[in-house]
Amino acid sequence: MSIRTNVSALNAQRTLSKTQLALKDNMSKLSSGYRVRSAADDAAGLAISEKMKAQIRSLDQAQRNANDGISLIQTADGALNELHGIMDRLRELSIQSANGTYTNQDRLFLNDEFNSLKSEVDRIVDVTEFNGHKLVDGSETNITFQVGINATANDKIAVSLASMGASAIGGATMLSALSVSTVTKALSAISNVDAAITDISTQRSKLGSVQNRLQITVANLASYKENLSSANSQIRDIDVASETADMARNNILMQAGVSVLAQANQMPQVALNLIG
């Protein structure tokens, strides 16, 4: 037993300081929710986690890109759906005008509506756009969507666009040149309107196939993000149950350490009492 140097108190103090640091670390981890808060906690784990975080954010953006692509295609398809409706009416007018019960004057009235609908085709084609991109006037033939988190060809999906204007669709005679002012012209218009319907249907089919790909891509990106987030959580996030149990243990050690230190600090006085 020493009077000058209280070794027991020094040991108790050292152990208590160590327990205090451990308890502080428990509280910091529990309050932040992270097991790895800095490179000091786990240098390799932090590096992997940060890379995963960047990938997760990139996946979010790729998913937004794919959804934007779907919206663009839906905009184009909506316009083409309207054109299909117009084609139906143009064909109906052609059949009507080809009927021998109508007079030439009647056919001129029918032709006025026919021409008006052709103008509406061009108007729809001209105004259909998405964020400044013309979708059905032929000014843009291809739009590429970045739907992956890397720069490879597999990270992109492209959609082909084509002009659907009255001067671009039809058979041997383009829609813009058709007329139903006579029986002969009306009969000719029938097959050419049919060809225009086929042109529009072909483009809608192409758009639909790309939209299906984008929808599958969105689902795949969501699954990829979920799995990557889970993996990142395993590396970086804290196990609350385990950390809480460890904090409870350190609390007990803290209380015991305080008690032991108090007793150790009494040792020199005990030695003096023995001398006295």
Image: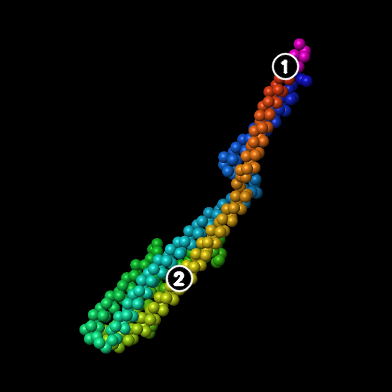
Mark 1 highlights which residue? 269
Q: Position of residue 28 (x, y in %)?
A: 59, 38
Of residues 55 and 259, which is closer to you in this image? Answer: 259
Q: Position of residue 54 (x, y in %)?
A: 56, 53
Q: Position of residue 183 (x, y in %)?
A: 28, 87
State whether residue 260 is above or below residue 83: above
Judging from the image, the colouring scheme is rainbow
> Marks 1/2: CA distance?
91 Å
Q: Residue at x 37, y 77 (%)?
A: 168
Q: Main secondary structure of the magenta part?
A: helix
Q: Amino acid at mark 2?
A: Leu
Q: Is residue 95 part of the magenta span, yes or no?
A: no
Mark 2 highlights which residue? 207
Q: Quadrant of the N terminus?
A: top right
| Magenta residues, start to end | 271-276
Q: Secondary structure at mark 2?
A: helix
Q: Residue at x 43, y 73 (%)?
A: 204
Q: Quadrant of the C terminus?
A: top right
Q: Secondary structure at mark 1?
A: helix
Q: How many marks?
A: 2
Q: Amino acid at mark 1?
A: Gln
